[in-house]
Amino acid sequence: MMIFGLSPEAIRERLRTGEVRATVYGLGRVGLPIAVAWLRAGANVISSDVDQKIIQKINSGTSPVLDEPRVPEAIPAGIVDGRNILDPAKIPNDIYHVGIGRVRNNLSS
């Protein structure tokens, strides 16, 4: 099976060499673990969030999501090796993910 016109082996090689770039917008409970999964696979991840406190926390090497496996330790590792970039101006990329917060309402049914 071909994805992006590449074989699975070619995709793995592009991940290993850091050629794959993924952009994740929204770094909450869904978006941050997805960004980490791409980091762990070898991709360069460019991420952004509307909440500047989340961006500051990640830039300081701390995860705002602590109860997801492998997320807290992946954040500082991605920053140290330069693969976790919090700058949405660094597009275009190969993969985009948009995490949208769940809308809650107080209406009873």
Image: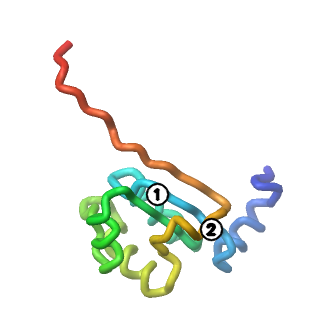
Percent of width and height locating residue 74:
39, 74
Percent of width and height locating residue 90:
59, 70
Residue type, label 1: Ile
Mark 2 lies on a secondary structure that is strand
- Label 2 to label 1, Cα distance in Å? 13 Å
Percent of width and height locating residue 28:
34, 54
**Residue at (45, 66) in percent of width and height:** 36
Label 2 or label 1, whichever comes before in sequence order:
2
Residue topped by disc 2: 21
| Quarter of image, res 14 | bottom right
Percent of width and height locating residue 79:
43, 81
| Quarter of image, res 107 | top left
**Residue at (80, 52) in percent of width and height:** 2
**Residue at (80, 60) in percent of width and height:** 7
Mark 1 lies on a secondary structure that is helix
Residue topped by disc 1: 34
User: Left of 96 or right of it: where is 40?
Assistant: left
Is 37 or 82 nearer to us in this picture?
82
**Residue at (30, 72) in percent of width and height:** 56
Colouring method of the image: rainbow
* 66, above or below 59, in the image: above
* 50, above or below 103, in the image: below
Toward the front, the furthest residue is 89
Is 55 or 102 nearer to us in this picture?
55
User: Mark 1: few, some, or many residues within 10 Å (few <14, many ≥20)?
Assistant: some
Residue type, label 2: Arg
User: Left of 91 or right of it: where is 109?
Assistant: left
* 33, above or below 106, in the image: below
Toward the top, the furthest residue is 109
